[in-house]
Image: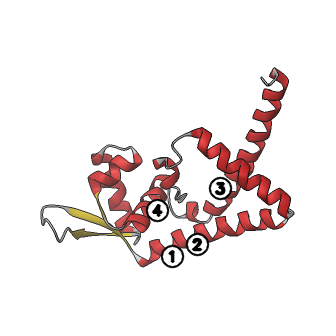
Amino acid sequence: MIPTDQQVDEDVEAVLAGSRAVVGISVRSLAEAMESLTLQQYRVLVLICSRGPLRSGALAAAIGVHPSTFTRAVDRLVAGGWVTREDNPDTRREVLVAPTERARVLVDQVLARRRAEFEAVLDRMDAEGRAAVRDGFARFAEAAGDTDMPEATTLGYES
């Protein structure tokens, strides 16, 4: 059965409302981190906390910035105590950007706050509602295609 224009509009509005709720939770979970960091800097921390030390060039490519611009960003992260630069033990010509303990704690706190907020929302639902949300999100992610989007990964959403 082909949905009517009205049904499509209602479906889109429902998805938009749900996405606003998810974005709101994400923004609230990041609020404290954004007092000390830019979103781009936070994305760097998430990448190196989840993947381990990375070359500056690889990090710049992952967040979509030019390497020369990224060098200045790393300088600020080093000065703030968020990252260190270390020689790559495999090739002395490369420098790796690694998270400090301070960075790991911050990223863990953001992810824990986000998880707690999602748990609180789900706790307000009955089992049938949670199952519907779980099924709906799984189907939506599948229909969206590539669910391992680099943009999501750099915000702490791992697949």
Could you tell me the amino acid type at mark 1? Answer: Val
Q: Quadrant of residue 73?
A: bottom left
- CA separation, marks 2 and 1? 6 Å
Q: Which residue is mark 4?
A: 46
Q: Which mark is residue 109?
A: 2
Badge 3 marks a residue whose secondary structure is helix
Residue 98's x, y, as percent? Answer: 33, 69
Camera-side mark, 4 or 3: 4
Q: Earlier in the sequence, mark 4 or mark 3?
A: 3
Q: Residue furthest bottom?
A: 101
Q: Earlier in the sequence, mark 2 or mark 4?
A: 4
As displayed, is residue 155 above or below residue 113? above
Q: Earlier in the sequence, mark 3 or mark 1?
A: 3
Q: Residue furthest left?
A: 92
Q: Are marks 2 and 1 in contact (CB under 8 Å)?
A: yes
Q: Which residue is mark 1?
A: 105
Q: Which residue is mark 3?
A: 27
Q: Are marks 3 and 2 in contact (CB under 8 Å)?
A: no
Could you tell me the amino acid type at mark 3? Answer: Val
As displayed, is residue 106 above or below residue 148? below
As displayed, is residue 83 above or below residue 24? below
- CA separation, marks 4 and 3? 15 Å
As displayed, is residue 150 above or below residue 159? above
Could you tell me the amino acid type at mark 4? Answer: Val
- CA separation, marks 2 and 4? 12 Å
